[in-house]
Amino acid sequence: MNQKAMRTSRVRRSITPARLAGGAAARWATTYLYRGEKRQAKRKQAMLRTAEDVTRTMGEMKGAAMKLGQVLSLMAGVLPEEMATQLATLQSNAPPMAYGLVEQVFEREYGQAPDRVFRKFQKEPFAAASIGQVHRAELRDGTPVAVKVQYPGVRQAIEHDLANVGMMIGLGGLLARGLDTQAIVTELKEGIRAELDYLREAAWQQRYFDAFGGHGFIRVPKVYHELTTSTVLVQEYIKGRPFATARTLPQAERDRLGEIIYRFCFGSLYRHRLFNGDPHPGNYLLLDDGAVAFVDYGCVAEFSEDVVAAFKRLIRGLLAGDIEEWRRSTEAVGILHPGAPFTTHELYEHMHWYWAPILGERVRFTPELAAEMVRRNTMTTGIGGQINKHCNVPEGMVFLTRINFGLAGLLAGLGAAGPWGAIVEEYVDDRPPSTELGRISAATTRDGRPV
């Protein structure tokens, strides 16, 4: 990738998705020349080839296109296995930009080259994502740091990409059947535009660093604000294993990791009114002491005390089995329009899937559960589709939808089981810790309450 291509190839960025869609459709059409098992084999080959093409293209385009691939890769059970497997590589293995472009960013931001700003600066990045890549470096005193550098021209490219990502989802109707394309694109616009400001991200990360300092199993990297700019973020380097390695661990360890991530996501919401809405594996590192480092804060929302109180009311109604109270609270928080022409039982039967993980004593996340959560919330036909027309995603809650789907997919990949409802009760009603991790959390937080 070069700077000129990122900044000036707007026509090409429109043509590329269309070409992908046409190629995929033609490839699929040729499978009709065969019958029986031969046709099925050809279709599998076509899907694998399309998955490879889409993943490569999204990685090269970066920006909104790549962010879309990361979001889709989390939707376990919704995408064909071949597509999900390929898209998962976008979580940390995107094609990097040339080092000359990194030098250009540093000249613009600091007026000097990277090796003058830092004692040491590795030219090859160790991670490349949708809007930037990360290099190892050392401060003047030898402190190891991770330096995230934003791709030149990505801001301009993103605005153009957002008009085309719907085509990337559909690919001629071959992929992600049942997904509400417009809903995903709308959410993508909200999140990715905010992620472009690294000063904003650094401020959110500092909030998390202050909240989780000294925690027993959650690590947040320190930010070096004096070196951070709007397109370069400098933070503590934390050595850890990629989250993808968790799939090889015994189930008990995967359950433990699932609980850590769950507590981080929802403990942040209920204890600190903060919500990190980008739950993909490239943002998590497994540490040798059993902790997990959470290293990306580009997509964060803060909720008011009134909104959190409304969430708590809704959860209490659900956990108590009081579905009339649940209906009233969903209307109060803005998820359901008042006066929807359905019985409360009809609404609950369709909508409770969004909260399914907390409705059992111990629930295991599976691809089937994750897929059903997405399917119910994106239905456009039948009674589910009719109910969805009376539902809404209130302002500020797109992050909740994103993480609920994304977290379900991530935990389904682990097959993680846990007492999710009991954990949420710790937050909603200040119940005592329900697990060993809860007790460790309570012992290492400043207010003595589990996160």
Image: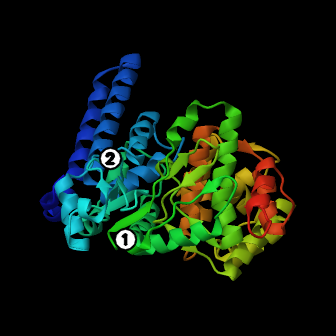
Q: Is residue 305 above or below residue 219?
A: below
**Residue indicated by mark 1:** 227
Camera-side residue of 36 and 128: 128
Secondary element at image label 1: helix
Q: Count residues near mark 1 (Cα–Cα under 10 Å), then give few for <14, some for 14-19, many for 20+.
A: some
Residue at 62% across, 76% down: 303
Image location of residue 188, percent across then percent down:
42, 64
What mark, if any, has residue 94 been given in the picture?
2
Secondary element at image label 2: loop
Farthest top residue in view:
37
Camera-side residue of 207 and 309: 207
Camera-side residue of 286 and 309: 286
Farthest front residue in view:
141
Image location of residue 377, percent across then percent down:
58, 58
Calculate the distance from the C-alpha at mark 1 to the C-alpha at mark 2: 25 Å
Camera-side residue of 119 and 271: 119
Q: Is residue 27 above or below residue 195?
A: above
Q: Answer with left or right where residue 7 lies relative to residue 327.
A: left
Residue at 83% across, 56% down: 433
Look at label 1 and name its amino acid: Leu
Image location of residue 244, percent across then percent down:
51, 39
Q: Quadrant of the C terminus?
A: bottom right
Residue at 45% across, 50% down: 72
Q: Answer with left or right where residue 9 lies relative to residue 62.
A: left
Which corner quadrant of the image does residue 340 belong to? bottom right
Residue at 28% across, 40% down: 53
- Viewer can see residue 412: yes
What mark, if any, has residue 262 been given in the picture?
none
